[in-house]
Image: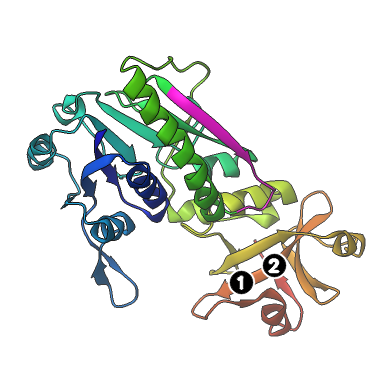
Amino acid sequence: MRIVFAGTPEFAVPSLRALVDAGHDVVGVVTREDAPLGRKRVLTPSPVAQAAADLGIPTLKANRLGTEATDWVAERAPELGVIVAYGGLIREPLLSGPKHGWINLHFSDLPRWRGAAPVQRALMAGEQELGVTVFRLVAALDAGDVLTRDSTEFTPGTSAGAALTELSATGTAALLRAVDMLADDPDAGEPQVGEDTYAHKLSREDGLISFGAGTSADAALAHWSGVTPEPGAYAMLGDDPVKLTELRPLDERLAADLPADLAPGEVRFVGKRAVVGCAGAIGLELARVQPAGKPAMDGAAWLRGRDGKADLA
């Protein structure tokens, strides 16, 4: 099938490569414009742009899908448009340009977690079974008929970055099945059923974990999972943020040795490891942290530098 692909981040790349490997004729790729990265803010192509260049596929870089994008896609006469985390909305007349319209690989079990950050918000809510859905793109947000679904079970403490990497592989299989379905039956698809929820885009403030406010270990770990690696989890040490690069549930030995008087937000050594107290007389291991203005370091090394004491609000 002749396909135009729209996507931007690293976890969209497996879908692009899978379509090519399956023998589909990907006649064009639309991605976001080069963005400044790193300390030197060097303009860098998106991961999808780099993959398209490797595959020799013509690419349009655009942050807004207006007249230029509509004309560019029309010139390629695609039968189908495929979008995976492009980072922008597709509206008419581009939406109805391809013969079979557009399909979207979305990283949730729709209609749950429609919106920009489905994996992150699902993890923050404590969900461990995360879904992928391939659906027909319509004018309403993430509301079109469903073609295929799949799901994966994750262990508590899996970061959003790790979950997205795994789901991108699961999603490619669901995407290829959906394309085959449309080839056999252009009218395929079933309406979404169930209560919808919205996955708001994350801000830096979403990364704050308030241990001292009575947050349970399960809730803190779920919160950490959803905001890692972006926008990044942190707690406050006085007026300064401490980035929580790696947070872990306690193993059986650490849990057995946990002091009964460890207060929520208090950080102490349990054995040789740094542990922060949570509500319910349970704690979490601060495996790796990044204090303000310093590089990331082992949590135990950070706590030793503070004479074995710290309080995270």
What residue is pinned by disc 2?
Answer: 286
Whether residue 178 is situated above or below residue 297 in the rendered picture: above
Per the rendering, the mark at residue 289 is 1
Which quarter of the rendered picture does the C terminus lie within? Answer: bottom right
Label 2 CA crowd tier, 10 Å (few <14, some 14–19, many 20+): many
- Secondary element under disc 1, as helix, strand or loop, is strand
Type of amino acid at the residue the image marks with label 2: Leu
Name the image quarter holding residue 68.
top left
Name the image quarter holding residue 244.
bottom right
Coloured how? rainbow
Per the rendering, the mark at residue 223 is none
Q: Does the magenta-highlighted stretch encompass residue 166?
A: no
Residue 276 on image: x %, y %: 74, 64
Residue 80 visible, this orientation = yes
Residue 85 on image: x %, y %: 36, 44
Label 1 CA crowd tier, 10 Å (few <14, some 14–19, many 20+): many
Q: Is residue 169 left or right of residue 176?
A: right
Residue 110 visible, this orientation = no
The answer to whether the residues at label 2 and label 1 have Cβ atoms under 8 Å apart is yes
What is the CA distance from the residue labelled 2 to the residue labelled 1? Answer: 7 Å
Which portion, as a residue range, is magenta? 147-158
Type of amino acid at the residue the image marks with label 1: Val
Which residue is pictured at 86% across the width and 74% down the height? 271
Residue 189 on image: x %, y %: 40, 17
Q: Is residue 103 left or right of residue 312?
A: left
- The count of marks equals 2
